[in-house]
Image (cartoon, rainbow, N blue to C red):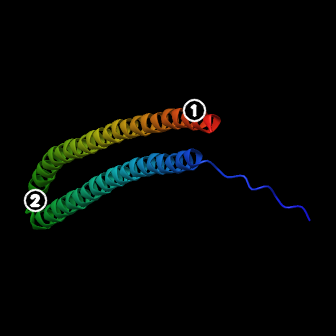
Amino acid sequence: MTSTPNYEVPAEMRDFAEKSVDQARKAFDSFISAARRTADTVQGSAETARTSAHDVSARGFEFAEQNVTAAFDLAQKLVRSRDLQEAMQHQAEFVRSQFAAIQAQAKEFGGLAQTAMQQSAEKAKGVMQESAEHARKAMEQGAEAARKAGADTEQAMRNAGNN
């Protein structure tokens, strides 16, 4: 039986390998941390959009209630009218007041939509800037780890060659 030759891995090579694994772990941890922060920011943007939609919906129901109440008030005035002229007067007042109310409601909806769009755009801009910065930092750390690993490899090879 022949025995397998026993090759010993130099200590410098083991140290280099251990440092490389540590550097890779740190770079990966940095990347995952950046990804988590980005996901949290995106979640915040989704929450902002949900809140805006809820506000618009709630305001829509309030406007609908106001408009229906105005219509019932008109109906009550119409049935109490003494003559056609009084009924026509109530109808004209209703049309004028509802036209103004609908204009105000449309203006408010427009403002709510604009605010929601601005908030979403600001959040998206923030997410993009933060993500780009995290990605840049992770790439710099990875490049530095690769540069250091290359230098460590060269040194380990020189040390192994000297032994």
Disc 2 secondary structure class? loop
**Quadrant of the image containing the C terminus:** top right
Front one among 112 and 138: 138
* Circle nearer the viewer, 2 or 1: 1
Q: In this view, does 87 lie to the left or right of 122?
A: left
Front one among 57 and 26: 26
97 to 162, vertically: above or below: below
Q: Crowdedness of circle 2 by 10 Å Cα count: few (<14), some, many (20+)?
A: few
Front one among 18 and 38: 18
Q: In this view, does 89 lie to the left or right of 56?
A: left
3 to 118, vertically: above or below: below
Q: In this view, does 64 lie to the left or right of 35?
A: left
Q: How far apart are marks 2 and 1 (CA)?
A: 105 Å
Disc 1 secondary structure class? helix
Residue 121 in which image quadrant: top left
Decide which of tag 2 and tag 1 comes sooner along the chain. 2
Which residue shows up at 28% across the image and 39% down it? Answer: 122
Which residue shows up at 39% across the image and 47% down it? Answer: 34
Residue 159 in which image quadrant: top right
The amino acid type found where label 2 is placed reads Asp
Front one among 62 and 10: 10
Which residue shows up at 37% across the image and 50% down it? Answer: 42
Marking on residue 83: 2
Estimate the x, y position of residue 77 in percent, counting from the top left.
11, 63
The amino acid type found where label 1 is placed reads Glu
Marking on residue 154: 1
Estimate the x, y position of residue 58 in percent, counting from the top left.
24, 60
**Quadrant of the image containing the N terminus:** bottom right
Estimate the x, y position of residue 103 in percent, counting from the top left.
19, 42
